[in-house]
Image (cartoon, grey):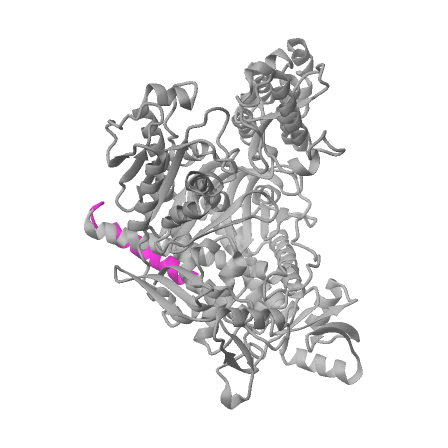
């Protein structure tokens, strides 16, 4: 299978890097992209998804193809505007079954450079400072190659770090030349590192031009590519640059982690490493980099080497690059498109078309239109005991599959009628006169259905030829739609792959750890795990590609149908759940030894709905049934088992009614081999619901695995903006609330934390916020009206630096990066906020940090948010006199 691909448009030539049975191969292939045009059946090369016969239109060169596609907007030009490499890869590899794909072992290089600035901080836009270190860690061998140039003393590295080969360089020119030549002679498949996209690579490119000039500098940095092709171009809306290297894929782990990883307070390598690995970067005991270089060159080299090691360790533990490779192979799409769903789905669908004698539909684009999103119920606010979460299994994919949603099966959108009416008429299989938007000859028209046209529609509905979403989107069912069919294939393929992953894990356990057989099966287990995660991503991506105009599958009415189905199904699940709990079946009641007593009035036991999840208060239901005394005698372990048994009965009851009444009835689905289903996911001992999208629960079990965690969704205590010092204290207060500690104990803890927080420094108590809109709000002058508080803080920070004449001592605040923000007390400069990375100690001469306001806004206010739903705000308010006395 392929590792990398590059298309030379000037020569109309594909450059392909493959690995087959462990052997690395490189080939150059003459190839030109193509389109499909209508033709007679006898001359057909393929069919469109609408059933038209088409033939392949070839071109002599890429530029002739490009001119044809750009000049021709005819809707009968099919498979237009496909990424060249994706069309080639799907064509070349489509006949290899997904589960028989050979997974190449990628050589990953982890890069990190160090620059020695005379003053201030290095800037890749003005690369005036020398590169003094560059390390490359080979992810396969674990060896690091470090190119070093001690600009101060020309010393060599004499450290004891294992697996480090140090290449001593007598000048910066030598360093860069050796680095570029090394990458050219020993090429990698993936180039990674931390923030290399935004700093290391653009600095190397621009520095090469400074040292050798425009033409010679380009020749030098182009050697980072195995075929000496490196493209560099400026981004449209900033001074940043994009870089593409033929023959290797750049996967900046900073961006990869932000895409797949946890939502963190900040994304520095130090913080991410501490979070994921429990160990950070090598500490610099000196006041500055310059001092470290002057006094301890060996430590400085180790510092550079360890940065590469940490990124390598992150990948070893997290496996995000492995997952990106699985996505790339599955979708026949270059790995650089890992975060572009439209390109991934493009390759996945093209592979399906090639396997089935089809071609992709015409890319038309369109205009984004709003539609109603998922259902979120207003929660029953407060703290509830023994709550279970019952979810729709793969909600959006399930609705795509069961209503046969696809571009070619989309019949039209019924308008005027509301959702309740559409559901009712669909259930009766008979509509009154209505209007429908239909696409006819690539134009949207309003069509009236009455008299004979209406009679034919209703007859087709009765015969099961239409499935109808609650929003009025109608789909034909006489043949499977390609989107629904591929979605279904992916769903079942993921299930197969998960089974194989588990099988490999079980086989590995039969052997001694680290034995050859153990390693073999563990490697296969990791491959299958990466593939199933990739399949999950693809399965959930179909909704996205139907709802955005830069996809060839864009259709707002289909996207709207998916969310409408999700809303109706989850509301129906709520009703069926309450039906069962308000009139319990004998199999539930028989679980308890006592007779119990039924409630005399109907009650809503679904405490909250979030998109595809029902949060059911079984603790309250048990109490209402009169089983509380018996229940309280059980240990938590037994309670969990009982709840699982109750949940299993609920699942079967809800699933049966959803299939018969909703899937077959309300949607008129003709799909019988795939059922929309519900599954119990979590068991919480307590759950606190504050408002929509803001809740927490004390988790004791997740999918059968014992847990003991406080999980939070949407509440400010887990927002990345909260200060690191505040977050654990807020979490502890929340834990006390969730575990129903005494009010006095909670109050004492709050007072203790207030006192501790008031002693902290600005860095420790600052909010952490991504800074966006600097140019928009500040421009070149004073802040505009409506400027956010943290952007005002950037202006104020620069103002004070200038006032003190220390602009070069502290790092400036750049667009898009996270920074720290604090309030300050009244001062002669009339400023109230300051945004910074490192608090300049000189600021203390001019302004005073306002700890009281920070504590009130970021601690007290959030504690109050937790206490208010359970009517315990008095825990705070009763202590205010003591607090005021303290301050």
Residue 489 seen by the camera: yes
Front position in the image: 61 or 192? 61
Q: x, y percentage for residue 814?
A: 57, 34
Q: Is residue 539 left or right of residue 560?
A: left
Q: x, y percentage for residue 673?
A: 50, 71
Residue drawn at x 25%, y 60% as measured from the top left: 23
Q: Residue furthest top?
A: 885
Figure check: 531 above or below 356: above
**512 is within the stretch colored magenta:** yes
Q: x, y percentage for residue 860?
A: 64, 24
Residue drawn at x 70%, y 58% as measured from the top left: 371
Residue 760 seen by the camera: no
**188 is within the stretch colored magenta:** no
Front position in the image: 437 or 181? 181
Q: Is residue 664 left or right of residue 787?
A: left
User: Which portion, as a residue range, is magenta?
Assistant: 494-514
Q: x, y percentage for residue 195?
A: 46, 39
Q: Please tell me how many numbered marks the rendered image carries.
A: 0
- Which quadrant is the N terminus positioned in? bottom left
Q: Residue furthest bottom?
A: 42
Residue drawn at x 51%, y 60% as measured from the top left: 343
Q: Which secondary structure class fits the magenta region best? A: helix
């Amino acid at each position: 299978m392929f590792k990398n691909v590059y298309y030379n448009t000037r020569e109309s030539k594909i450059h392909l890097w493959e690995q087959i049975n462990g052997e690395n191969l490189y080939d150059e292939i003459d190839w030109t992209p193509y389109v499909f045009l209508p033709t007679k059946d006898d001359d057909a090369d393929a069919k469109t998804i609408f059933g038209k016969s088409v033939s392949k239109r070839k071109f002599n060169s890429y530029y002739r193809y490009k001119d044809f596609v750009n000049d021709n907007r005819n809707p009968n030009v099919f498979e237009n505007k496909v990424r060249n490499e994706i069309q080639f890869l799907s064509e070349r590899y489509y006949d290899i079954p997904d589960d028989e794909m050979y997974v190449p072992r990628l050589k990953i290089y982890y890069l990190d450079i160090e620059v020695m600035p005379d003053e201030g901080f290095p800037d890749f836009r003005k690369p005036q400072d020398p590169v003094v270190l560059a390390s490359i860690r080979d992810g396969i061998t674990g060896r690091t190659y470090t190119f070093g140039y001690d600009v101060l003393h020309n010393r060599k590295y004499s450290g004891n770090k294992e697996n480090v080969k140090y290449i001593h360089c007598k000048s910066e020119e030598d360093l860069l030349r050796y680095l570029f030549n090394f990458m050219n002679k020993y090429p990698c498949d993936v180039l990674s590192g931390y923030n290399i996209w935004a700093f290391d690579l653009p600095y190397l490119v621009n520095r090469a031009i400074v040292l050798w000039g425009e033409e010679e500098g380009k020749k030098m940095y182009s050697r980072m590519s195995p075929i000496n092709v490196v493209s560099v171009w400026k981004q449209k809306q900033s001074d940043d640059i994009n870089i593409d290297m033929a023959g290797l894929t750049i996967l900046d782990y900073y961006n990869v982690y932000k895409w797949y990883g946890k939502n963190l307070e900040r994304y520095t390598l130090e913080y991410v490493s501490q979070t994921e690995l429990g160990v950070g970067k090598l500490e610099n005991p000196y006041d500055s980099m310059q001092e470290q270089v002057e006094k301890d060159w060996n430590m400085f080299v180790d510092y550079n080497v360890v940065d590469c090691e940490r990124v390598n360790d992150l990948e070893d533990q997290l496996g995000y690059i492995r997952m990106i490779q699985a996505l790339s192979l599955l979708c026949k799409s270059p790995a650089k498109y890992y975060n572009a769903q439209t390109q991934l789905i493009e390759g996945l669908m093209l592979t399906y078309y090639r396997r089935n004698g089809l071609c992709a539909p015409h890319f038309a684009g369109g205009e984004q239109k709003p539609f109603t999103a998922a259902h979120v119920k207003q929660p029953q606010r407060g703290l509830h005991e023994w709550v279970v979460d019952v979810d729709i299994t793969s909600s959006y994919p399930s609705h795509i599959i069961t209503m046969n949603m696809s571009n070619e099966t989309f019949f039209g959108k019924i308008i005027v009628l509301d959702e309740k009416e559409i559901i009712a008429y669909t259930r009766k299989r008979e509509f009154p006169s209505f209007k429908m938007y239909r696409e006819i000859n690539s134009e949207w028209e309003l069509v009236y259905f009455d008299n004979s046209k209406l009679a034919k529609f209703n007859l087709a509905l009765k015969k099961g030829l239409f499935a109808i979403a609650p929003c009025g989107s109608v789909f034909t069912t006489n043949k499977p739609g390609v989107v629904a069919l591929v979605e279904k294939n992916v769903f079942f393929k993921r299930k197969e792959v998960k089974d194989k992953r588990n099988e490999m894990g079980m086989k590995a356990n039969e052997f001694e750890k680290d034995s050859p057989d153990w390693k073999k099966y563990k490697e296969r287990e990791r491959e299958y795990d990466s593939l199933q995660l990739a399949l999950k991503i693809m399965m959930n991506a179909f909704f996205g590609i139907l709802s955005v105009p830069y996809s060839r599958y864009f259709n707002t009415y289909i996207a709207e149908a998916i969310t409408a189905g999700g809303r109706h199904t989850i509301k129906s699940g709520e009703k069926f759940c309450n039906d069962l709990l308000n009139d319990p079946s004998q199999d539930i009641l028989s679980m308890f030894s006592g007779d119990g007593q039924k409630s005399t009035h109907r009650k809503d036991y679904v405490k909250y709905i979030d998109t595809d999840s029902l949060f059911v208060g079984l603790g309250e239901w048990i109490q209402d049934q009169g089983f509380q005394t018996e229940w309280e005698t059980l240990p938590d372990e037994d309670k969990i088992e009982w709840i699982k048994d109750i949940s299993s009965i609920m699942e079967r009851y809800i699933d049966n009614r959803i299939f018969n009444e909703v899937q077959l009835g309300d949607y008129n689905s003709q799909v019988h081999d795939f059922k929309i289903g519900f599954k119990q996911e979590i068991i919480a001992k307590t759950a606190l619901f504050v408002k929509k999208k803001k809740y927490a629960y004390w988790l004791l079990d997740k999918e059968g695995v014992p847990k003991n965690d406080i999980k939070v969704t949407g509440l400010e205590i887990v927002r990345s903006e909260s200060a690191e010092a505040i977050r654990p204290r807020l979490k502890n207060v929340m834990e006390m609330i969730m575990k129903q500690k005494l009010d006095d104990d909670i109050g004492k803890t709050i007072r203790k934390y207030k006192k501790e927080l008031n002693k902290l420094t600005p860095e420790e108590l600052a909010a952490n916020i991504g800074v966006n809109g600097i140019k928009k709000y500040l421009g070149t002058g004073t802040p505009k009206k409506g400027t956010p508080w943290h952007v005002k803080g950037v202006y104020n920070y620069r103002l004070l630096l200038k006032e003190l004449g220390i602009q070069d001592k502290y790092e400036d605040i750049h667009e898009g990066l996270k920074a720290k923000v604090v309030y300050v007390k009244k001062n002669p400069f009339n400023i109230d906020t300051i945004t910074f990375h490192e608090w300049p100690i000189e600021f203390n001469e001019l302004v005073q940090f306002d700890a009281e306001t920070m504590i009130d806004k970021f601690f007290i206010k959030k504690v109050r948010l937790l206490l208010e739903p359970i009517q315990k705000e008095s825990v705070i308010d009763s202590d205010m006199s003591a607090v005021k006395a303290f301050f």
